[in-house]
Amino acid sequence: MKRFIMLISFLAHLFHGKAQRTDYSKYPVYKGNDLGLTYTPKWSLFKIWAPTATTAEIINYSDGTGGKEINRAQMKKEENGAWSVLAKTDMKGTFYTFRVNINGKWLEEVPDPYAKATGVNGKRAAVVDLKETNPLGWEKDTSPGFSNKTDAIIYELHVRDASISATSGIKHKGKFLGLTETGTKNPAGLATGLDHLKELGITHVHLLPVYDYNSVDETQPDTKYNWGYDPLNYNVPEGSYSTNPYDGLTRIKEFKQLVKTFHENGLRVVMDVVYNHTALTATSNFNQLVLGYYYRQTKDGKFSDATACGNETASERPMFRKFMLESMKYWVEEYHIDGFRVDLMGVHDIETMNLVSKELHKIKPDILIYGEGWTAGASPLPDSMRALKANAHKLDRIAVFSDDIRDGIKGSVFEHEDKGFASGKPTMEETIKFGIVASCKHPQVDYSKVNYSKAAYAKVPSQTVSYAECHDNHVLWDKLAISAKEATEAERIEMHKLALSIVLTSQGISFLHAGTEFLRSKKGVENSYESPDSINAIDWGLKSGNKEVFEFIKALIKLRKDHPAFRMMEADKIKKFISFDNEMPAGIISYSINGLANKDKWKTIRVIFNGTGKVQKLSTSGTWNYAIRNNKFSADENEYSVPVLELAPYSCTVLYQR
Ligand code: CA
């Protein structure tokens, strides 16, 4: 019966659906790796993929905008939908666009989707000799050493936010170069920018979008702010972060300078990539060369929108899969990028993500790939095929953000008044425990009581990114101000410290949002993607004002780096070495990492969180050293026999035995 109904529906689809839906699987697939521009001083080869075009042309210009047209040439049709044109002269310094004619209709003139350089605002691709973009010593640039993925402590930073405030003491404000400056200080003389990142001790700097995005006018970059989740040219750095957005070379050179400087200072660089949608939809360069192909459609043939940004790309179609793969490989090979944070990764199909991971690991075995295992809307691609959090176990060496621990710590990002474990909400213990074991299987976690996931989704702890906040939604300090407004500021500082203690002692990969180490505020603005600098800029004065918090977070990072027990690489080890203490009072979590876990120098580590607003007493036995006593690091090397631990409100205590 069921089969019969399916047959009927299939026939109905054939007769009624066919006229309006295009079968993109019939499109030829171009296998070459020379799409875009191949430049030599003697000739330039330009190539696009446009299988439905009847004619195609290239238009060369003297400038990135305006200026004069210097040449217009018909392109030659090649195999598998490709079109090419060979210019037998040195084209360096010129700009170009393409346009195609489909069945007698010219589509819009657009820049090369494979462009590696553009003029101002990304309107035209630029012909550059990439050899001229390398900063001095680039050929010797290597990434700092890094072995296990769980060693990563990621710091999420927006290029402009880092330096734009007067308190940064940085000269190149809002620019890539601003992050290459050393010796910069805030008004009280404390390190800012790059020196601060080194001082803090993080391992990876994750930059919010630095590819060319659409929303900021590069001719007047100080008139508008944006996070940059609106991609224009995927393989080109953003012009507003360069000192000269008109020249195709400068932004490339300056971004490479940033990567090189970070590497020299022991920091790895992660790019935030947004292949799930394009800023423009019908008029995007992809769509004006091949109508519809690069995007998923709804049943009625319209652009589907799992990203809530107007479209969603179709990674499962071979030529977009190829584009994503080649684009990420290009950033790793040309710019020496060390990792990717994949925006709305749940939009992409698992097969593409695993292919990307496999190929990138071949180039850089210690590359870090992690993403948002969700979407912002419904997608026509079935859930089982998409790189969703629940499918993490099907992903190969790819991590997902744990919104479970994020909201378990501080409360739901969608309900502003909601609290979490660190701000005194009861019943969050199992969610925090789920986070402590990095979403792996552990016999002492009751998954039925976890806020979101009702099962372990990570195969290994390196598949979980633990965090309390990111650029989206309220920053932690603002969230605490809104949800725990009855608490005093002093109490909220303890909550903040407890929250980050949970992040930095949990298994998995640690992730911090820039400025959280000194209580950064965005003045209550929830999604500051286009808010002015007055909201987004990092106020480096806070580092002096909240120096004690900064020193605490810095010491937490050091604790994590000094102790492999917090960074186990196998789920089995977590199961074996971590044991939770049963029958704790409500709002208390206590666990031990036993037996020189993961070759730690400490025999036993006991971590205790008091998420309540009251002093709690806990009986204990044996003699212990204090690493952290009630949110304060202890330099005391003595062992104590403490029959009753007094846990301060909203506090973390870490004990150990040698
Ligand atoms: Ca731009």
Image: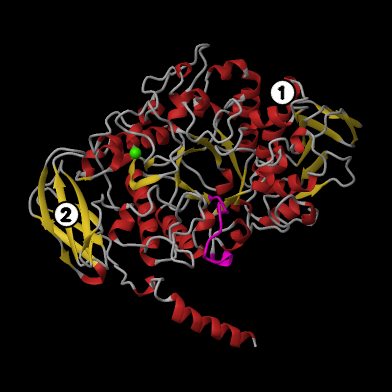
Residue extending farthest left: 89
Q: Quadrant of the C terminus?
A: top right
Quadrant housing residue 382: bottom right
Tell me the tag on residue 29.
Answer: none
Q: Which mark, by number, is residue 58?
A: 2
Residue located beneath label 1 in the image? 635
Q: Which residues are magenta?
A: 371-385
Q: Residue drawn at (54%, 81%), measured in percent from left and top?
A: 9
| Location of residue 92 by image quarter | top left
Q: Position of residue 468 (x, y in %)?
A: 64, 38
| Residue under the point 60% across and 59% down | 392
Q: Does residue 286 appear to the left or right of 591 in the view shown?
A: left
Q: Is residue 632 magenta?
A: no
Question: Crowding at label 2, few (<14), some or many (≥20) Cα neighbours within 10 Å?
Answer: many
Quick one: 23 or 644, which is closer to the camera?
23
Placement of 68 over or under 320, stated as above or below: above
Q: Quadrant of the N terminus?
A: bottom right
> What residue is shown at x 79% (from left), y 25% (from top)?
638
Give coordinates of residue 331: x percent, y percent. 36, 48
Q: Earlier in the sequence, mark 1 or mark 2?
A: 2
Q: Residue at x 57, y 54 (%)?
A: 373
Residue 646 relative to residue 479: left or right:
right
